[in-house]
Amino acid sequence: MSFNFADTINFLTTTVYPWNSGTLYVDLVDVSGNTVKTAGPFTVSGASLNYTNPTTLNLNWTNIAPGTYYLVSNSSTTSTLQLMYHYYAGGAPNFTYPIASNVTGRSKAIGGFYPTASPQVYPYYWFFFYDNVISGPCENPTRYPVTVTVTPSTPIVASSPSSPGICSGASATLNATSTNTTYLYTWTPGSLTGASVSVSPTKSTKYYVNAVDPITGCTAIDSITMAVNAQQNPPTLSPTNPTICQNGSVQLTATPASPFGGTGQVGTGTTTGYTYSYPSPFQSYYATDHEQYLVLASELTAAGVPAGPIVSIGFYINGSYTGPGLQNYILNLGQTSTINALSSIVTPSQVDNGNGVTGFQTVLSLASPSGVYTPTAANGWQVVTFNTPFNWDGTSNIVVDYSMQRCVSCVTTSSTCNTWSYYSNADTRTSTTTFNSALWYQYQYNDCSVPGYSSSLAPTISKVRPTCSSTGSVLTPSTGRLT
């Protein structure tokens, strides 16, 4: 192989691909045939047709003067040693050397391909050395391993004093904080810059803040969702023009024009099923049914539901419900911090009732014989209004726990449950989630164990959950006396 060095250099390593075993000596020869540098012996070995297992030779030649040189194997190399080669059949490539004139001392290439005629008749050009490593004269030819430690970027936190939402037409301040004081912040959407920005979204919007350290180039990202609630009409005051005597008083009542607060839909699915499909919050196909749904805090926040009292839950019914009234219809809610809550039946000891007490909070209980729940919606939302509001903390996930028993008395055989027969479920819309979001188990008879939380019950667990809506923080009429 031919080299033309324009400056003083260090020749560090070269690489060969041996096809058998032997001892290799390598020389650096000038154009006059003088050996300038030599290295070896190198013991090499390899298999026939070796194209993938290289052997690196440490030459460590320093201070080679400018000039033209040839890299060759000398006459001490094992005569039968074979190295992978490359050749050109014509021309004079400047990175190869003519085999007949410049490498007469090298080992043969491989039997059957060694040129047998003079270069004028058989002008092949060959080279056997690859991946040559050369450095400048000021570099140290010795290489030392260096360990690089990658330090994670400092995290950032996006927040807002207006979280989780604002009224339509209002503004909100978004803040980004970090222990890294050199971060530069950019917000999207809006292409806003700075650690604190003001936004006026017209609909619920998720804002991303990207932080870049101008010194290290490290980055960090966080996000915050701002819900936008409809602006409410002024409340109605009554009486409107009260007249009182001196030192008298009159009672004034302020009534909101409409309930307000966060009312949002969780899940966008419109998938329809059958009148015997599950999950179903209004089921009548079996005599007893127990179902649980997991709703994430992030889903409620994205839907615009604020922290505070939740007063209802709704499910969209396709068509209409044709079954009988649902007896012993009980609805409980609980809070949990894990997304894996529905890996099995959630027991009361695994949730918080919203008031810091362990256990589900019963928000609706319609016990037989007098209490039944009958869905009436047709191609629309069936809203179940709670008897007792549920106080959501705004950060926990919510477990919705529903059960029903058709019979008045709790028995385990069909012979004493004369009211039981198959009916149709309400066909409710469902949405698909990425986590276990629903479970259910039923019994064709009035099995008193079904509404319970026994670990022996084997529920069906699914990532398909009823599409639902939730309403929170509703205003009620307020009264006071004016004196």
Image: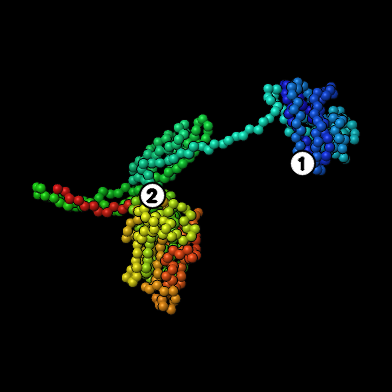
Q: Secondary structure at mark 1?
A: loop
- Kindly identify the residue that appears in the image at 40 percent across and 38 percent down: 175
Task: State the residue position of label 1.
Answer: 51
Give yes or no for contact between labels 2 and 1 (Cβ–Cβ under 8 Å).
Answer: no
Q: Residue 272 location in percent, x, y? A: 46, 62
Kindly report which numbered mark, 2 or 1, lies closer to the viewer in this rendering: 2
- Kindly identify the residue that appears in the image at 38 percent across and 38 percent down: 198
Q: How is the image coloured?
A: rainbow
Decide: is 233 above or below 65. Answer: below
- Mark 2: give few (<14), some (14-19) or many (20+) Cα within 10 Å: some
Comparing 395 with 196, the one in front is: 395
Q: Secondary structure at mark 2?
A: loop
Is any atom of residue 192 visible in this view? no
Q: In this view, which residue lies farthest toward the left?
A: 246
Which image quadrant: the N terminus?
Answer: top right
**Lower position in the chain sequence, tag 2 or tag 1:** 1
